Amino acid sequence: MSDPADDSAPTTDFVRERIRADLASGAVQQVVTRFPPEPNGYLHIGHAKAITLSFSVAKEFGGRCHLRMDDTNPEAEDQEFVDAIQEDVRWLGFEWDALYYAADYFDQLYAWAEQLVEKGLAYVDDQDAEAISTGRGTLTTAGTESPFRGRSSAENLDLLRRMKAGEFGDGQKVLRAKIDMAHPNLNMRDPVLYRIRHLAHQRTGDTWCIYPMYDWAHGQSDSIEGITHSLCTLEFEHHRPLYDWFLDALGIFHPRQIEFARLNVEYMLTSKRKLLQLVEDGHVDGWDDPRLPTLRGMRRRGYPPEALVAFCRHVGVAKFNSTHEISLLDHFVRDHLNKTAPRRMAVLDPIELVIENWPAGQIEMVTAINNPEDEAAGTREVPFGGRLWIEREDFMEEPPKGFFRLAPGREVRLRYGYFVTCTGVDKDAAGAITRIRCTYDPATRGGNAPDGRKVKATIHWVSAEQALDAEVQLYDRLFTDPDPAAADGAGFLQLLNPDSKKVITGKLEPSLQHAAPGERFQFERLGYFTVDPENPGVFLRTTTLKDGAKRKK
Ligand code: ATP
Ligand code: MG
């Protein structure tokens, strides 16, 4: 596998091939794409794939990409989501050439509906939702025609205008296209174009009491904006005949809809409905909980947007749905952070180490490298003294074969500090180790012995006197099962990982006192951490250093 993080390589796939062909044949002069979220929730990692694709394609071919709020259903939509979506798209690093709202097309969509009625291609149906659904038939049986299907154009036009004027209650009438009740594709069996809903819309207020259905709004919105390639996920493949039928019936500009596979990642849920349930039932701490695959959650957790985009590019577009390993996403996150995150020392499961031959009360500054991957990041000074914190697991009183870190009689390097040799331990009444005793070799300052002698392990530490006590939140995957979406109904709630969030107090090197909200670090040997933007002073673990968090002996 070539370096998956290398996004400079030319990308090709069936979407780009199609666009190239359309440009070559002259069918398309300038590529125009769009990302059309419904503002009824927050964007998640699946949307990141759709965003990356539509924006990148437009850029690669010198075209334009629109952001369109697909805001045709006021029931679950909200201005809060409209704002959040823009913020999240920008956070990913993309900027739209224009921002549009499907609601701004309501007048035009309505005028087109009257045209269909006049052409005899749409009718007002008085049946209720259940009767319409039953009448649609099944995959193996044809539908039945509505008793209202034969209404004259004049009658339909009058009824449609009265629907719009608010003369009827919710659900009393709908406008349907008149296509074919025996069509093999159920979407073509006289689909509903408008339904009555007496509800204010976040953008159009009380102007409307009839609202267009997705299929009636989407293709025409694409057409109005001059979208050349309307990229959407595979579940819309069966809607394409209808998309095409409406545009042909109206005789307006005809964009090309191309479907690609949804992005699925192991251990992650991307259904807005299920995410909502997790938030509303309090299984997570809000939409920006660091365990959620929402862009806000991942941003808060410290995922660099560049890593998400690189992941989406690497995954690419295909025609079949597949699920990607979470470790692949982590790979891109680590790859970016390894190059960019300054190193710091922190001890998360502290045990005290005392240096018996250290001059009483003396504190020295030792020089530590900020990022071995980036010389320009420079160095910093870290206090070192006779009382230090080290990780409990870096010491074993009776080390098994293969354990090379600190043990009685053994010498190790304290990173950037000195070589120390363990002389013994203190224990409490119950026999638990309370303190590790060592001596140090003053000649090894900086971490190297002038006589060239070697040690088998280097461990990190924090000077006890200057240590910053800080809350650290350790995050792990939210579900215990790689495919929580497969569970029936609310079954995914049974698969929640009880250990997905652990809160501890860590001992941090004092320079971290000045860490800014959102700043990202590598805690040496432990993982990548960020300062919680919502709670400055609290550190969140973005990811461990290695898959499975297994550390070298
Ligand atoms: P809902 O669950 O409400 O249907 P949705 O996930 O389809 O929501 P939209 O706001 O309608 O959300 O999605 C906007 C665009 O993002 C659509 O073009 C959709 O195809 C795409 N998209 C949504 N989820 C994914 C996913 N998992 N992978 C790739 N693209 C996605
Ligand atoms: Mg949708």
Image: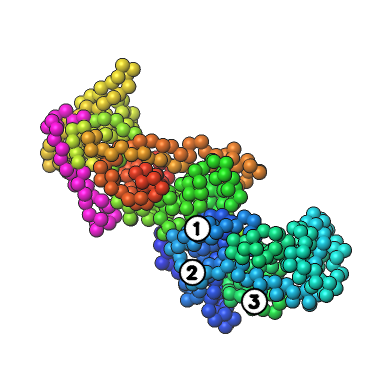
Q: Amino acid at mark 1?
A: Ala
Tell me if residue 50 can be seen.
yes
**Amino acid type indicated by mark 2:** Trp
Q: Badge 1 local density, few (<14 within 10 Å), some, or many (20+)? A: some
Question: Which numbered dot is residue 96?
Answer: 2
Q: In front of the other: label 1 or label 2?
A: 1
Q: Nearer the viewer, mark 1 or mark 3?
A: 1
Q: Position of residue 1 (x, y in %)?
A: 44, 58
Disc with the residue nearer the chain's start (1 vs 3): 1
Q: Secondary structure at mark 3?
A: loop
Q: Residues within 10 Å of mark 3 (few under 14, many from 20)?
A: many
* Quadrant of the rendered image containing residue 126: bottom right
Earlier-in-chain disc, 3 versus 2: 2
Cα distance, mark 1 to mark 3? 31 Å
What residue sits 28% from the left and 21% below the top? 427
Q: Position of residue 316 (x, y in %)?
A: 51, 62
Image location (x, y in percent) of residue 432? 32, 22
Q: Residue at x 23, y 50 (%)?
A: 369
Residue type marked 3: His
Q: Which span of residues is magenta-colored?
A: 354-382
* Residue 117 percent coordinates (x, y): 78, 74
- The residue indicated by pointer 1 is 84
> Is 451 left or right of 483, judged from the image as shown?
left
